[in-house]
Amino acid sequence: MEGSSPLVALVPALPLLGAMINGALGIAKKPLPRLMAGGLASAVMLGAAGVSFMLLFGMLSGHGEGGHAATLTQTLWTWMKVGPVSLDVGFAVDPLTAVMMCVVTGIGSLIHIYSIGYMDDEADKDSVWRFFAYLNLFAFAMLCLIMGDNFGMMFVGWEGVGLCSYLLIGFWFKNSDYASAGKKAFVVNRVGDFLFLCGLFWLFWTVSGRTDANVMNFAVLSEVVSKDPMIVGGAGGLTVTGICLLMFGGATGKSAQIPLYVWLPDAMAGPTPVSALIHAATMVTAGIYMICRLNFLFILAPAAMAVVATIGVLTAFFAASIAMTQTDIKKVLAYSTVSQLGFMFLGVGVGSFVGGFFHVITHAFFKALMFLGAGSIIHALHHEQDMRNMGGLRKYMPLTFATFTCGWLAIIGFPGTSGFFSKDEILWLAFTTELYKDLPLGMVMPKVLWAIGFVTALMTAFYMTRLMCMTFFGAYRGGHGHDDHGAHGDHGAHGDHGAHGHTPHESPMVLVGPLVVLALLSIVGGAMNLPHWIAEHGWLHHFLSPVFAGSEALAVFDAHSPLEFPLMGLTLAGVTASVGAAWYLYVLHPEKPAEIAERIRPLYVGSLNKWFIDEVYGFTILAPLYLLSRQVLWAVVDAQIIDGAVNGAAAAATTIGRGHGAAGGGRIQVYAIAIAAGAALFAAAYALS
Amino acid sequence: MESVGLFPVLALSATLFVTGMAGVLTRKNALIVFMSVELMLNAVNLAFVAFSRQTQNLDGHVFAVFVMAVAAAEAAVGLALVILLFRNRITVSLDDLNILKG
Amino acid sequence: MTQPVLFYLFSLVAALSGLSVITARNPITSALSLVLCFFCLAADYVLLDAHFVAVIQVLVYAGAIMVLFIFVIMLLNIRDDIPSPLGDVSGRAIVGLIVSGVMGIGLITAMDKGIRDATFTAVDENYGTIQAVGMELFRAGGPFLLPFEVISALLTVAVIGAVILAKKEI
């Protein structure tokens, strides 16, 4: 089943090389100009993508056991070795990794190319090398995360993407709001990382005593656990549930779920390509990827899976409710991302790892597309992000409009598009899963999950249509005075370019090209995993079966329920109604939304202000923390205990020094006494021995 | 001496050595300190000779001779220093000498 | 039977005169006590069959070195004006005595453990004579030839150094 390939390590090595070249030249104060830096970064990404696809196609053509693809591995060196446990700098490419790798490098390449065009601002001329170095570094870390064959490598990547995310959110760190957005992302992620580490330690602690296998390696752990679930305390046991919940805690941080989602909307402070690559397509899906990677563990803990699904669907609903009223185009997309991530967790949570992962891929396509489309608009409008100052852009930016429409169709689930297949599969499997049948309320839960998911899908259709309408339809509302939203700019430091006097224009090809590719993928991407009523087996389903087959067999789905088509029809009808409503409100009667908002004012204000979650966190967590830090940790622990210890040590050293100085008083007999005392001690010691 | 044994000789040696040591450590007069050093050297010489007698060879004797030569050299230089000191400071008290103070 | 009696007698005198060296008020008393001590040690050397060393002890130590001491004492005409050696009991002196005491007890105890029962055996009549020591010292290929030459150089250096130090003007 396993083969070794020297090409594997090339995939992460290429972006690392790019980051090192750009970084080294930049640090040496001889940075490459934008075109060369971006060209280099894009070239290494294209190289990595080329190798990735080569490996993928190699796996498709080569057949391992039972017609399934073999796993490719490459171990560079041993990082550390303790007893039977060995952490290697090693990579393993199984079908799951191969697909994810292609998504990351493929979309990554497109976004790198897009960035060359996007980062053309004069003010960034001297720091653009940093941007591309970070972007390459991110790709490297992400590839480590998904390709590492053990927990060590995954964690290195996990932290690495967090670091790069922080660096890129705060790319324009001269604006203190952006800098603190980066810090917020970093700190919130830290909470999740802590939980993840705790889960990892618990797992290691539980397993290591019971087997001699190298349990830090995913493949070995999978084999060991599948053979004997008792090694993690038995299926459904408290231990495995606890471990899975802690690891899911890590995922809520990285993948922006309740309660740790708050950093992602703020992360939109970064340049738009960063939002597309890191905060939509790749990094934020790391949590789902991790659960997929550890599916053999999670499937043993139905209670933990229920929590995953519940948190996922609640996050989806909650984020969608906020997205309904936001006016910043990137904020809408950000909450939409949180919401879609919730769908993915719903998918894996009900036991459909393929479904969740399929949505990761399709979401990567259409959300990257929409972010890049938004970036194109923002670029054309000179860093205007407020949708109230857009409108009618379809006339000025036809290509952006066309591609954005593809993304819109995909996300609302228009039949035949990629989003339709993936979202529908998740909803359907949520409805039919029998994973929870042993839990209390286990028979009702799938229906509730489906219901919330269904409502969320309608809300998604509504707010995405609202975004389309406000941005592309109606009349262009920019171009006149704007004094209340200067700070919303992607680039606040730049202020007004005087752009609003001009009509918007279509973006250059370097921006639009990637949009077109992603638009095609968004439309046809669903073909990779067609549902059973079209094809016998979806390709993705088949390809990933070596990874998931064992686990999905445990999560039984009632695949032939007669309700499938009625439910699908219900969803479609609801979505159509939502779209129609949004169209009615925002295109035909643009004055109506304000009236409705007035009528349901509490809801509107709550949604507009993100349900005051940031304020609640500030009041319940940050304020006590600050109080503790200032009044206790700083005033007492730091100023008195630590400083006291430091100053005390200095004072003690002074006193001792003075004492020694007295001993060195120049009296030769005092010295002689010291020598004689030493000799006498030796004599006494000899006498006593 | 066969009936005396090694121990009384070495006990005398140790007594003289400790006496000299006490003089070195307690007296202030540089000359008396010097004499105490000579006493210690002699105590060592006695030990050399006694051990030499015990082991029936002459190495200890040779060493005793060397020690005497070194003691002579030391006395010559040391007394010259005392004279020099007295000439400059009108004292031979070691308590008045603390120019080594760090 | 006379040998032990003589040994203990001389040893007692040596120890007492040694004590006198460090307790005497007047440096001259100290010096003369030291001469007495050296003579007694010379006698002990004879009893230990170290004839040559005994002779050298009298010639070099009791003769040359102590004469030098007494010359210097008289030259400087110093008197120890301390009423008693321990009259000005300083902390340093007490510590010095304690250290010396520990040293003495340690040495005696160690010897008591190590060589309590070691005895002397008879030696041939040539042992310790000038001839025997000379043969040992100057034996061709022996280990002491170079040290002997170095000692002579040391003495020369010491003499020159003493002259340079003590002379008022060169």
Image (cartoon, helix red, strand yellow):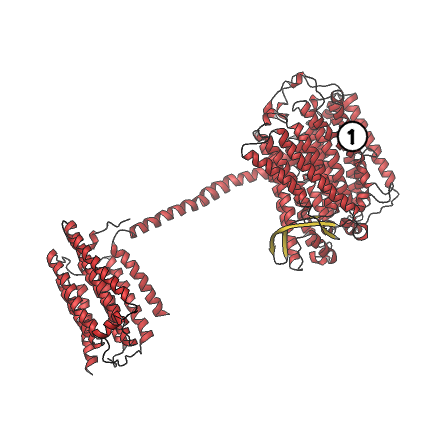
Q: Position of residue C167 (x, y in %)?
A: 14, 52
The part of the image, by quadrant, that contains residue B25 is: bottom left
Residue A212 or A250: which is nearer the viewer?
Answer: A212
Residue sitting at the far front: C140
Q: Residue A508 vs residue C29: left or right?
A: right
Q: Against A156, is A608 above or below?
A: above
The numbered mark 1 sits on a residue in which chain? A
Along the horizontal axis of the image, is A82 left or right of B70? right
Q: Which residue is mark 1?
A: A406
Q: From the viewer's perspective, is residue A87 above or below residue A631?
A: below
Which residue is drawn at the image coordinates 65% and 17% (left, top)?
Answer: A481
Quadrant (top left/top right/bottom left/bottom right) for the C terminus of chain A: bottom left
User: Badge 1 local density, few (<14 within 10 Å), some, or many (20+)?
Assistant: many
Q: Residue at x 63, y 58 (%)?
A: A84
Residue drawn at x 22%, y 65% as measured from the top left: B68
The answer to whether residue C76 shows anywhere in this view is yes
Relative side of B46 to A515, left or right: left
Closest to the observer, A644 or A592: A644
Q: Secondary structure at mark 1?
A: helix
Q: Nearer the viewer, residue B50 or B70?
A: B70
Question: Residue A25, how many percent across, how many down?
Answer: 57, 34
